[in-house]
Amino acid sequence: MIYRLYRGLTSLGAPLIALYLDRRKRRGKEDALRFPERLGRPGSPRPAGPLVWIHAASVGESLSMLPLVERLCARRLGVLLTTGTVTSARLMAERLPAGAVHQYVPVDRMAYVRGFLDHWRPDLALWAESEFWPNMLTESHRRGIPLVLVQGRISARSFAGWKKVPGFIRRLLSCFDLCLAQTEGDAQRLKALGSRDARCLGNLKYAAPPLPADEAELARLRAAIAGRPVWLAASTHPGEEGIIAETHRVLAARFPGLLTLIAPRHPQRGPDIAREMLALGLSAGLRSTGGLPHAGTQIHIADTMGELGLFYRLADIVFMGKSLTVGGGQNPFEPARIGAAILFGPAMDNFPDMAPRMIEAGAALRVADGDGLTEALEKLLAQPDRVARMKQAALRWAEAEAGVLDAVEQALAPTLTVLEGRHARP
């Protein structure tokens, strides 16, 4: 009943959908040059041979899929990766290996879905995390395309919501031949909601290679900040920068020359953050202007795309944002993979298993609030030996977790082996 209502609304609501998309285009949230892809009109030809379609909603999900994309390409399978955001499209243009192509996922209206599937004719579909688009899932299933949920994630809050519409979520999950969950808790929730086969093999975010960095730029920045105590606040959200500024103000008196690096989750916020810092009496510079931090710079804002790996390598101590004033947390595995001592706030709901395991391994510390951040950072800046131990613990922990990719590939092996000997679907 709910699915029929959804399908009817998405069919009859074409004018409203068009208005919504047009508004997003005006706000820069849709790619004007590639906008037809959002309407199910292809922007590239379909490659010959078997094609694996991977759908990942945005930046985080697509990055976690990259190691799997590389494995599939190594097996000489064509890969189509779809995402829904402009930022993820730009990043995938830089990071996708040869043999893989990116497209924007079509809006979940049946006419657009059918145009997309008619052109691409995928032989296998892998969906990341919790992106359940009803029309796309049911139409793919109707066409006999094998569907696997990878990195499946159902939070406790989402679980409570889905339980209110049990028939609807059961129908959607029944489209998947297999659900590979991030955690055992996610696997149990997927089973309770109706998955036929839900397993936990681990988190593919553990298999991600270290974020890249331009060596020449790294050398330039290291020379510019040589001799200064440095820390990084990564993937910050509104409200957190003010807390970080106060932490800097308190600690600068004890640690002369202290440099605070801020890498906001959304780089376009860089100029606003700089103005906030200046209003608080702190000198701030923007990475996007091309300038280097100088002796008078107190806050340097990394407001560029694709350079987080560069800044993770500049700072031995990294605080992960979205964990103080905003809930959920950002991925702490990325700095651990490079070998950083990690701090995060109390709200790490998106990483319910990863965060406590990192603490247990000695790779990370949890702080309760802004005062806790200041206190923990003060201790670490004063104890370089302790920081070195945390860095080594982070590297050991990250490397020990990296075998999940093999387990996921093995679970997909029966289907992949069939595809390797098959031509494209007629």
Image (spheres, rainbow, N blue to C red):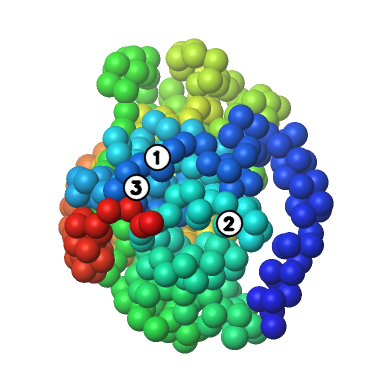
Distance, label 2 to label 1, CA atoms, is 18 Å
Q: Is residue 309 left or right of residue 170?
A: left
Which residue, given by chain and number where applicable, does mark 2 sit on?
113
Q: Where does the image place residue 133, in percent across and percent down from the top left?
A: 57, 64
Rendered view: 60 above or below 29? below
Whichever of callouts 2 and 3 sits on the residue coming sooner in the sequence is 3
Q: Amino acid at mark 2?
A: Val
Q: Where does the image place residue 311, in percent across and percent down from the top left?
A: 38, 31
SS class of the residue under badge 1? strand
Which residue, given by chain and number where applicable, does mark 1 sit on?
101
Q: Where does the image place residue 258, in percent across and percent down from the top left?
A: 44, 27
Q: Nearer the viewer, mark 2 or mark 3?
A: 2
* Disc 2 + disc 3, Cβ < 8 Å: no
Q: Residue at x 34, y 14 (%)?
A: 220
* Disc 2 + disc 1, Cβ < 8 Å: no
Mark yes or no: residue 4 visible.
yes
Q: Amino acid at mark 1?
A: Val
Distance, label 2 to label 3, CA atoms, is 18 Å
Q: Is residue 185 left or right of residue 13?
A: left
Q: Amino acid at mark 3?
A: Val
Whichever of callouts 2 and 1 sits on the residue coming sooner in the sequence is 1
Whichever of callouts 1 and 3 sits on the residue coming sooner in the sequence is 3
Quarter of the figure with the N terminus: bottom right
Which residue, given by chain and number where applicable, does mark 3 sit on?
79
